[in-house]
Amino acid sequence: MADLGPLVGRRRAPGRRLSSGQGRLEREDEARATQERAGRALLVSLILAGKVGNSLSEMALLAKSAGFEVVDRVVARRDKPDPATFLGSGKVDEIALQVTSLEVGLVIVDDELSPVQERNLEERWRCRVVDRTTLILDIFAQRARSHIGKLQVELAQLRRLSTRLVRGWTHLERQKGGIGLRGPGETQLETDRRLLAQRVKTLQGRLRQAQRTVQLQRRARQRAGVLNVSLVGYTNAGKSTLFNRLTHERTYVADQLFATLDTLTRRVHLGSGLEVTLSDTVGFVRRLPHTLVDAFKATLEETRQADLLVLVVDHSDEDRDRQIEAVLTVLHEIGAAAVPRLLVYNKTDVRGHEGDRLQRDAYGTLTAVWASALTGAGLADIRQAFIERCQWRDGSLTTLMDGEVSHGA
């Protein structure tokens, strides 16, 4: 009996024919090998002179969230990015060898690439190349579930595509004309731009209509005098777990970046007739693409209109201070920097906290709580913060300069 053996990579001798069974096996093996290679990713980061490099750990988590297996990481250093290939020619050649030896199907660059740089790198590495923004957009596209969420993702993708058309699609620069068309006609590139602009305009109209519905619901809550609270924070800080604990919901929770994309709002009853509405919003990351911030105004509007922001922080993360800074930057960008905030240092079950479990300012306002959404520790303190905020709002609670809290007569 002939030895079939592995058929991947085997070249047929000239004139040799495979049986139908052998041909099918070869095609299946080649398809399987191609699929496996497409899921293998190589991460690349460029550190400029005088700058502190960003850890590729977060980029690896982003790649994992998108469904890729990270097989290696490459860090390069230059005075400034190369306008043609982003990296130096030597580093480009070095990575080309790694792509081949590691059977990589995707290279992810932890920065923004121009269309020219992206195209040149794909030609040199003979595989797909994406930058940070494209990867995050891909994750958002996978996570969007609601109608408004899908509209926002598509709008962000089309806006990004329109910028790529302007500078990168030189192969579309060909005239389009014919019988019955007056004038010089238009290039294929101009046609694509026009179609993109029309689709963007349609999406913007649908988003405005969806926003009006959300605004009506928000105004109804405001007329009822209900305190609006929004959970914000760095992605994977545990916002959804905390949301489930406080509302007794069962929303999707996973140890991955951007597990939750669509805003979900529920009522939380605090006793004595007090209640708040609590919203779980999309998580933030450093260098969140401006196209996403702009497109997701409808979702982020819930944050801007909130009466209180609960900023959830991963207490166990060594990089938590930079994560807080990144969240505050986005809040400033969307006009929510002035909204009162309560810091919740979550995941004390992972990394303990030896000091006080809560912190108040000089006026007695509860400003920080150390808690664990997983075990339930500190949840009573968070609910107490909601109660005090409601009581301050209706005037039944006052504060003293020494930090003591007193109830009005």
Image: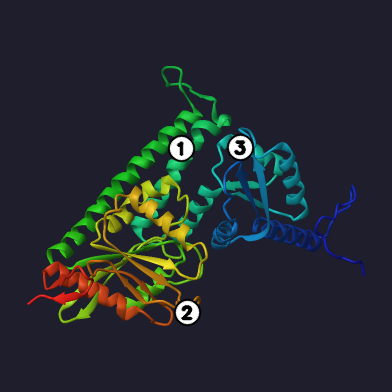
Residue in the image at 79% along x and 60% along y? 20
Q: Check the picture and name the quadrant holding the N terminus.
A: bottom right
- Residue on which the image places disc 1: 162
**Mark 2–mark 1 distance (CA, rounded to whole Å):** 46 Å
Q: Nearer the viewer, residue 160 or 210?
A: 160
Looking at marks 2 and 1 on the same chain, the residue that comes earlier in the sequence is marked by 1
Helix, strand or loop at disc 1? helix
**Residue kind at label 3, given as amino acid type:** Pro
- Residue on which the image places disc 3: 81
- Residue on which the image places disc 2: 349
In the rendered image of this protein, does residue 66 appear above or below residue 188? Answer: below
Residue 99's spot in the image, x, y percent? 73, 50
**Residue kind at label 1, given as amino acid type:** Ser
Q: Check the picture and name the quadrant holding the C terminus.
A: bottom left
Question: Mark 3, residues whose alpha carbon is within 10 Å: few (<14), some, or many (≥20)?
Answer: some
Q: Quadrant of the rendered structure where residue 172 is?
A: top right
Q: Residue 131 — which label?
A: none
